């Protein structure tokens, strides 16, 4: 997943390419039912597949102070979006925030690999 934090607002920018995400969109199950569903890890698309026919490209506008978080499902399986946002808002340094997120996921079970990449944007101010 790719998240964008601006101020205190966290937005999930990417869509999960899983059976579960499609079932939630179709109204077949709820988000709470998906947390323990046996098919929650069934992928419909992933990097490295030879038959990958569609690539999602989405430009985003960033401002100084914005943050991006790219993470694996090992993080999002253990931490809610609210908790992820809380870590990102309270810990400004990328390395420290990434470490805190990984440790928090491990403390909650951490059954899958946990990958986290953080980016802080510090853009030069323009004069007009």
Image (cartoon, helix red, strand yellow):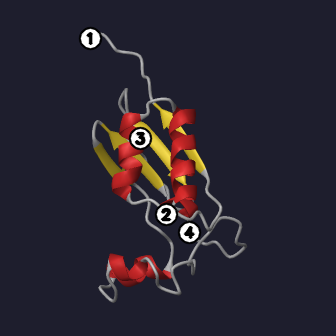
Mark earlier in primary sequence (3, 2): 2
For the C terminus, give its image quadrant.
top left
Q: Gap between marks 2 and 4, in whole Å?
A: 28 Å
Image x and y of residue 85, in percent: 36, 47
Label ID, residue 21: none
Q: Secondary structure at mark 4?
A: loop
Image x and y of residue 89, in percent: 36, 38
**Residue 58 visible in image:** no
Label ID, residue 78: 2
The residue under label 1 is 128
Mark earlier in primary sequence (2, 4): 4
Q: 10 Å neighbourhood of mark 2: few (<14), some, or many (≥20)?
A: many
The residue under label 4 is 54
- Foreground: 95 or 3? 95
The residue under label 3 is 88
Specify whether 77 is left or right of 66.
right
User: Foreground mark, 3 or 4?
Assistant: 3
Instruction: Please report the residue visible at 54 percent of the width from the left and 54 percent of the height from the top.
Output: 71
Location of residue 41 (image quadrant): bottom right
- Foreground: 51 or 63? 63
Mark earlier in primary sequence (1, 3): 3
Specify whether 93 is left or right of 112.
left
Specify whether 112 is left or right of 27.
right
Instruction: Please report the residue visible at 57 percent of the width from the left and 77 percent of the height from the top.
Output: 43
Image x and y of residue 46, in percent: 62, 69
Instruction: Please report the residue visible at 41 percent of the width from the left and 43 percent of the height from the top.
Output: 87
Q: Secondary structure at mark 3?
A: helix
């Amino acid at each position: 997943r790719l998240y964008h934090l601006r101020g205190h607002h966290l937005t999930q920018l990417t869509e999960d390419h899983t059976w579960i995400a499609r079932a939630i969109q179709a109204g077949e199950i709820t988000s709470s039912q998906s947390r323990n569903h046996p098919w929650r890890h069934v992928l419909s698309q992933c990097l490295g597949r030879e038959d990958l026919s569609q690539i999602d490209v989405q430009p985003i506008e960033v401002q100084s102070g914005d943050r991006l978080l790219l993470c694996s499902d090992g993080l999002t399986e253990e931490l809610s979006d609210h908790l992820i946002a809380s870590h990102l808002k309270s810990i400004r340094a990328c390395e420290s925030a990434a470490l805190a997120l990984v440790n928090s996921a491990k403390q909650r079970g951490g059954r899958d690999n946990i990958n986290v990449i953080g980016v802080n944007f510090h853009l030069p101010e323009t004069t007009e």
